[in-house]
Structures are given as C-alpha cells and as structure tokens.
Image (cartoon, rainbow, N blue to C red):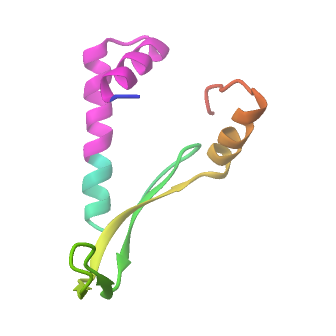
Amino acid sequence: MTKAELIQRVAAIAGTSVKDTENVLDGFRDLVQATVQNGDEISYRGLGKFSRSSRRERKVLNPQTGRPMDLPAMQVPRFAASASFKRIVRASDDGAELGRAA
C-alpha cells in the first residue's frame, strides 16, 4: 500500500477529508521521528512501540571486494509490534475480520 492509498483509506474510515488525514499522518510521522531521534520511545496501544537501538562497531566483508572493513557503531530505529497486533496478523490466515482497535 502506498502513502496515497493509506491516506485515502484512513480518510474513508475516519470520515475526514484527504487533506486533513494527510496532515495528521504526516504529523504522526514527524513526531515519531523526532521523538526516537531524541532517544525517547513512543508506545501506541494496539500497534507497538517505536524506539531506537544502539549497534556496536563490527567487522563486515565488503560485498564488492570481499575485503574486511569496519562498520561503525550507530543508532538505528526499532519497532516492536504489540501483542494484540501480532494476534491480528496471525489470525489473518484464519480469515478473521479486522476491526477497529480499542
């Protein structure tokens, strides 16, 4: 699903305009990015937790040359799905209908 399709579908479910929905989703994205960048977490009940994680420096092989190289330590974004979200995804194979999360 593309961003445009997501906006259309959320607008239809929420009964809001496409422009208002786009503004809300863009605001959500910006807030998550800024919060995680600052080292804080955002938990969204029924969806999951957005956070950041540290990766230590490590040695890897350059795929083009095959030579070893050092990959520096870095901060990476992390998302952990909530238990209810995991249950919904697992149940989708059973033909369960998705509903609005409380």
Picture layout, residue 25 above or below residue 39: above
Q: In which quadrant of the rendered view does residue 17 lie?
A: top left
Name of the residue lying farthest toward the right? 94
Main SS of residues in magenta: helix
Seen from the viewer's position, the closer of residues 91 and 34 is 91
Q: Position of residue 35 (x, y in %)?
A: 30, 57
- Residue 49 magenta-drawn? no
Q: Residue at x 41, y 28 (%)?
A: 1
Q: Position of residue 94 (x, y in %)?
A: 78, 32
Picture layout, residue 53 above or below residue 51: below
Name of the residue lying farthest toward the front? 65
Quadrant of image for the C terminus: top right
Left or right relative to 7: residue 30: left
- Residue 5 magenta-drawn? yes
Q: Which residues are magenta?
A: 3-30
Seen from the viewer's position, the closer of residues 84 and 61 is 61
Q: Residue at x 30, y 82 (%)?
A: 61
Q: Position of residue 21 (x, y in %)?
A: 32, 22
Residue 40 in view, yes or no:
no
Q: Position of residue 3 (x, y in %)?
A: 32, 29
Residue 19 in view, yes or no:
yes
Q: In which quadrant of the rendered view does residue 97 lie?
A: top right
Q: In which quadrant of the rendered view does residue 101 lie?
A: top right
